[in-house]
Structure formats: C-alpha cells, structure tokens
Amino acid sequence: MCAGVALMGFSAQADEVKGSAAAGNGKVWLCTGCHSIPDYRADYPYVYRVPMLGGQNAGYIATALSEYKKGERKHPTMRSIATSLSDQDMADIGEYYAAQTASSPNNPLK
C-alpha cells in the first residue's frame, strides 16, 4: 500500500506538467558536475553519495527536485540548483534521465 501511495505522488506530478526527454537533453548540463561521476561522494556540508540518474523514474526525479526546491529535502547545493528550475525544467530533466539506458548514446552533458 505504501508503494502505491508513493507512486500516486509521482503520477500526480507527471499529470501536471508533461516532460520531454529531448528538451531535457539541453538542461542537464549542471547535473553532470556530480551525477556523471561513478561512485562520487559530495563532501559539503556532509558526505553524500551522489547517485547516477540514468534510468531513474521520471516522476521520482521531478518530485525530488521539487522537494529540494521547497526545502523538504536538505542538501544546500541541490536546493540552490532546484530553485532555479521551473516545473517544466524538472519534468524535462526527469524524462531525459528516465530515457537513459546502458546503450544510450554518450551525451557530453550528462
């Protein structure tokens, strides 16, 4: 039941704004500084494991970015980045990363 409730939150976000992987392609440049490095750990203000985003659920990514923007998730760098994003940007970035697979062409911006 908890998983169903969590997924309802993701689908509610997706219903509001339709993301585009093609549009997200040009918006992920800022994400690459941390999220494109295998096993990267950020060290300010605490040590965080930085996840690779390719293949993640689009709704999850958009929701996470929204939560950083609102201050519901606590990471100062991510909050700073998320506050500069619109709901459309978040949806596009989510769709871009959701479309990534091991066989996706290498994008120098990801």
Image: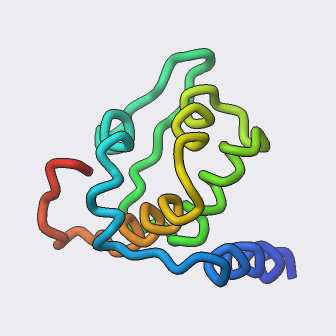
Q: Position of residue 32 (x, y in %)?
A: 31, 42
Q: Identify which residue, 69 or 42, lies in the foreground.
A: 69
**Quadrant of residue 64 within the rendered picture:** bottom right
Q: Position of residue 9 (x, y in %)?
A: 76, 74
**Quadrant of residue 33 within the rendered picture:** top left
54 relative to 69, above or below:
below
Q: Residue furthest right?
A: 1
Please report the residue visible at 87 percent of the width from the left and 82 percent of the height from the top: 1
Please report the residue visible at 83 percent of the width from the left and 78 percent of the height from the top: 5
Q: Identify which residue, 86 or 48, lies in the foreground.
A: 86
Q: Is 76 on the left-hand or right-hand side of 55?
A: right
Q: Identify which residue, 62 or 98, lies in the foreground.
A: 62
Render colour scheme: rainbow
27 relative to 36, above or below:
below
Q: Is 13 on the left-hand or right-hand side of 4?
A: left
Q: Is 42 on the left-hand or right-hand side of 71?
A: left
